[in-house]
Image: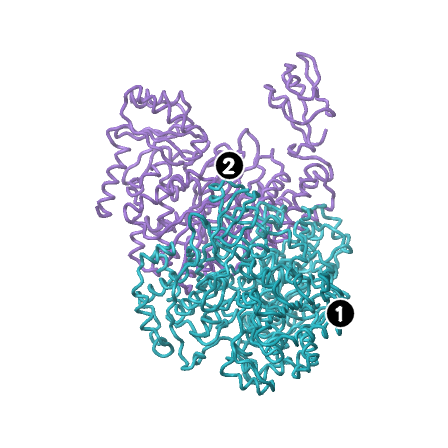
Amino acid sequence: MKRRMEIILDGQRIRVDEGKSILDAALENNIYIPHLCFRPGLDAFGACRLCLVETLDGRLVTACETPVEDGMQVISDSDRLNRIRRVIASLLINGHVGDCLKCPRSGECKLEDISSYLGINDEDLTKLREFKIDDSIDDSNPFFLKDNGKCILCGLCVQSCDIIGVNAIDFTFRGAKTKIGTFMDKPLIDSICVSCGECVETCPVGALVKKSEKPSREVKTVCPYCGVGCGIYLGIRGDRIVSARGDPENPVNNGRLCVKGRFALNFVNSSERLEKPLIKEDNEFKEVEWDEAIAFIADKLSKYNGDEFAAIASAKCTNEENYLLQKFTRTVMKSNNIDHCARLCHAPSLVALSESLGSGAMTNSINELKKASCILAIGTNTTETHPVIAYKVIEAVKNGSKLIVVNPTRIELVRHADIYLRNKPGTDVPLILGMCKAIIEKNLIDHEFMKKRTEGFESFKEYVYDLEWDEIESITGISRDKIREAAILYASSPAASIIYAMGITQHFNGTDNVFALSNLALLTGNLGRANTGINPLRGQNNVQGASDMGALPDLYPGYQSIDDAREKFEKKWNCKLPKEKGLILPKIFERACKGKIKALYIMGENPILSEADINNVEEALKSIEFLIVQDIFPSETSKFADVILPACSFAEKDGTFTNTERRVQLIKSAVRPPGDAKPDWWIICKIAEKMGVPGFEFENPREIFDEIRELVPAYGGMSYKRLENGGIQWPCRSRDDPGTVFLYKDGFTRENGRAKFILPSFRLFETPDEDYPFILITGRSLYQYHTRTMTSKIKGLEEFKDWKSLEMNPIDGEKLGVREGDFVLVKSRRGSVKAKVRFNEALMEGVTFMSFHFAPVNRLTSSVRDPLSGMPALKVSCVDLIPQ
Amino acid sequence: MNFEELVQEAKKEYYSIFQGELPAILIGSATCGISAGANEITKVIEDEITRENIEARIIPVGCIGSCYAEPIIGIFKGKKEGVLYGPVNKNLAKKIIKENIMEDKTVKENILGTIHVNEAGTGGSFFESDFMRLQSRQILRRCGLINPEDINHYLATGGYTGLLKALEMGADEIINTIKKSGLRGRGGAGFPTWLKWNLCRQSNSQEKYIICNADEGDPGAFMNRSLLEGDPHSVLEGILIGAHTIKAKKAYIYCRAEYPAALKKLKKAMKDLEKIGLLNTEIVIKKGAGAFVCGEETALMASIEGRRGMPRTRPPFPTTKGLWGKPTVINNVETFAAISLIFQEGVEQFSSMGTESSKGTKTFSLVGDIKRTGLIEVPLGTTLKEVIFDIGGGIKNGENLKAVQIGGPSGGCLPASMIDTEIDYDSLTSAGAIMGSGGLVVLSDNSCMVEIARYFLEFTQRESCGKCVPCRLGTQQMLLILNDIVQGNGNPEDIETLHEVAETVKAASLCGLGQTAPNPVLTTLKYFMEEYVEHIMDKRCPAAYCRELMHYFIDKERCTGCMACLKACPNNAIVGVENEPHFIDQVKCLKCGSCMDVCREGAILKVPGPG
């Protein structure tokens, strides 16, 4: 509990917590003291000098920077103060360019407030010499403009850019010429700005303003892009989404957002949206009414059963919808052939962490990163893929946490790292085991933890002992000293946290990579405690939820095995359920090619672009007899469909998403769906009903959620009402359970309560050779999302980093004799693609990069899979580059 | 070799310069000397001794302070007192080699005085000269008499004995010693040094820093540069004593990049210090990037941290939250030199000089319309009058004293009537000026006080970091008004507006730069209001300085009609015939001053009023 202090402000006694400033005290008590450069949540800057107040001894101090002291007497309004404020405000207004009526910030402008509060008049201004500041406008950014003439240099934008670790803007020049600018005063678009718009949110005047229209109302919901699950307020005008801002109360993002969350949500309004059900007749799609479409599907599907049917659920859809699709697959179609895109992201995490610890999810929470004394970021380009988590990592580093980055590419996060290990692509197992070896050698093991909470330590120790440093060095390309240094830092930190993503999982031995990380965390006792853990960062907004909901071929909702829990589910669902395990995603396509899968129901996915080695997928889709594609936009996949069903986007329905830290959050319907588009849950219910199968009589998502709660113990204590403010992290087993910030506090969720060391094996799928001498890494760009179904509708995003190019180190470019902008043919054992060359010095020599937003890239990748999880080796392939 | 042996060796070597077999030639080779031609003189001397096949030692030394007489050389031969010459041109240099060195005859030209140097101290007629008599060279005692790049010269003259004494003392004893000395910070604000060190020492942190502020940026100030160039070890010794006292993890010297010679000498000194094993704290030299505001301590620390040099509000003071957020002592170059002085020579010697509240001596850059400019050092409490008329020899060209600008752009202009003011922290502050770091500009009645205020404002405005509104826009507003006034575009309300803005900037600015920036305006308004009024109401610059408010005039009595001015005038504004007095056509005159430059008769006059 903070001590309460009492101060006397202008004769009034007001109370405030110790550590607060005089300005905090005033504002908390609804007392206005003029200020421009202060904003709650950011550091006081003391630049505008308008909040100067007088102390009892006549000193002038800034209210924003001066902490309260008990019994302090402060005067906030006097002739002297008003005289000073008047001059300062007049000086600012004298240099201010523009007509308030034409300013987008009008009505919310702090300078306007101050002018009217102080009563600035002509007399104040005419006695001053006219002085115009640089009034140039930088409108290079597609989403916001920077109007220098309106800037008052409060520095809030600089601070907000610093907090997220980007530092694209700062004070530049000196004296009266000072302005906020980028390095070398380049336009924003050519700077290192990541266009997150944090600065725009903090600007108190019209100097940084969104180009978008202003909303007439707002709806609180959750961002539909990545797995971070930022709380947002959608800005709506009429029936259109026009803006978004971060929800400051949301515990995940505390109001912060990235470029997509803030500026790329109006794909919802796109005229390309699907508005009517479409049935293919003679290779042409024909618009039909829902009744006809439903009847058509029901009729068709009733002809297939069991093994002939498969469904692909969606990590973009709600928990309720994923639950229903798996229920539909299991109870109506009597099949376990259901899977979703987690197969392409964190299937190895699910397999490995379930086996070693008990659950496949992030053990700890996003906000705990801020308090971790050491963060190991391995195989994650966090600033590109999970920007808001990256903000927190950087914030942690600024507050003294140590950061170890492991990545073949010198990613942005390396700028903030204490130790950077640049291993050869795909060599994580030997690297991590090298760290384990160093920890064992230095005896930095948590012995107590080994004894009480783990099993298999001794054999792991022996295994690691036998590893040769020479071999580790030659495979990884990193010296033993460097590996030791990282290991010691990780192991000797009081609370160390691991974050990882696709750089670990999308490998031929993805599951082994995760085993290795799990061992590293176990060895040092960095599990089951606050601010520690092993944390797979999930890619899709609801990929965690889709898994939780049992959109998996071998598990029912709540990760209950189809062998052990079948009786429970048969009872609840009141029907017989199939006993055979279903097919995983790549197998579904494989079997489709062979004519074994005849009917496929795809909800909100675009596998023809997202799967590895898409040549196969295309063949599969062609072979399928009856294909249902349910989506918000026509996609590359929907071309192959027999029926296309128009679905609602995240902004047109209610439901829940579960983010990467197991937080279940409510999403709310904000606008009417276009045309006849319907929520996915409604569509599934209607088909089931038409097919005469009971169990789908839901009126709304809340009723579906109630059924989920009964079946999934980890969701048992949740309700829509309880999720209203910031959501709840599972497990939450009862009404009074506040949810779980970190897992395994009292034991691991394995049979004996102990975590298990599992020996990872190491193998590389492909290594560069004479024919294919380059490594190709695939990954994501901040400015695009997956197969671009949504982001392709946002024109502004096109202006950022070219996502269609092949990136390579300029040294390789020189060797090949190609220059930036030249085209090369990228050829792998699977296929070839033409791409434009872009140089990127962050890449290792011999390593190239293509974003998977570029559709044909998966012609190059291999569908050879990790045997334990079915994950294709998407991350690393070997290619040849032929200059064109 | 232990320290004692080192010192014995050093003494033997150093004092042999002044009493040895070989003749020694000391050449003032600090930046001031070099810009006056010391390198050329050195070359001449080297050539000369090679040609004549003389055995002699040439020793580059720092600045002895007599800027008006640069380049300066000192000749020491045998047991006799050395002779100091200046200014020395090439011919004189040759003559000195020939006569003084080869023939043992003192050249009777440009002698500044005699000097002797031995273990008992220094002396000679140079120190009795008008320029030197009232000075007390303590901080600068080695400058001009040692080779700054030879650690032996420093060791021979008591160097590092202060550090060794301090290393044997506890922190309490050190701080008490400084307290007893009465030393106040020489950066300008005069904060008691012992208190600053003590606050930092008592701060609860494992990690502390000590910083030497060598970002001397005031126009016309060069005390720190001369000290670093003339006696770098004395600063290092003070830093090491401080580092030992507060248990600093690391020390930084933040020095202007525009001081390459000082930087070079500091680096050499650190290397030598390391060789003799006394460098017991890591010292890092950080080069400034040319921003005046980085002399402000919080901006300086931001700059070291790699951020833009912008000040922040104090408190918290650096002693509790300084570099990297850790407790930090930050002192000026001269303060550190004073520390080493106190520990080498004893606290009594230091505190015996100065006034009750301001102890010791202070160095000043004495510049402006004065006969003898230079780097001087006087006991605090010396009056401005003594400095200007005794040390400086009064105003040059027979003009009258109008004002003294003291403390640089942050300081103020005191009128001639106040020259009995004693130079100490408190007297200057109550007079409306500040001690500042020690710039002292003497202004004759040819100076326009409005222009002086405008000049300094232009400087502070350009150097404002731009963070706080009053400083960024207030200084700009004052400058705009002053620009108008000196161009004859002022209006009567401007005086009130100037006052109002100046008072606001002073009261409301964030850092010292802004808070003191209006001082030149406020003091000139206070002491020279009539000049403002004349500029505004009569459109007349009484000093005939401001171009728009003066005109050139040909004195008929003096003009011989030589036609020199007529030919020089770029706009054919001068009319006349040979051997008859000429006239200036005021309409055509561009006021470029070319006529005045070429007139040998002194017939062209500057007259107040636009003409």
Q: Amino acid at mark 2?
A: Val
Left or right: B559, with A378 as reference point: right
Is A518 in front, or is B331?
A518
The answer to which of A865 and B10 lies nearer the viewer is A865
Q: In terms of depth relative to the viewer, which is nearer, B120 or B303?
A: B303
Image location (x, y in percent) of residue A507 = 46, 62
Q: Taking A678 as reference, is A640 above or below it?
A: above
Give me the chain that's cyan.
A
Q: Quadrant of the C terminus of chain A?
A: top right
The x, y position of residue A341, in whole percent, is 56, 67
**Chain B representation colour:** purple
Residue picked out by circle 1: A676
Which is in the foreground here, disc 1 or disc 2?
1
Give the class, few, some or many, for how many residues have Cα within 10 Å of label 2's Cα (few <14, many ≥20).
Answer: many
Q: What residue is at 57 percent from the left and 40 percent from the top? A: B403
Question: Is there CB contact under 8 Å for labels 1 and 2?
Answer: no
Query: What is the x, y in percent for residue A625?
Result: 64, 67
> Identity of the amino acid at label 1?
Asp
Q: Where is residue B465 drawn, in percent x and y? A: 57, 49
Q: Is residue A164 above or below residue A710?
A: above
The numbered dot on residue B367 is 2
- Label 1 element class: loop
Q: Residue at x 38, y 56 (%)?
A: A476
| Total numbered badges shown on the rendered structure | 2
Tell me the distance, in whole angstroms, between the alpha carbons under discs 1 and 2: 87 Å
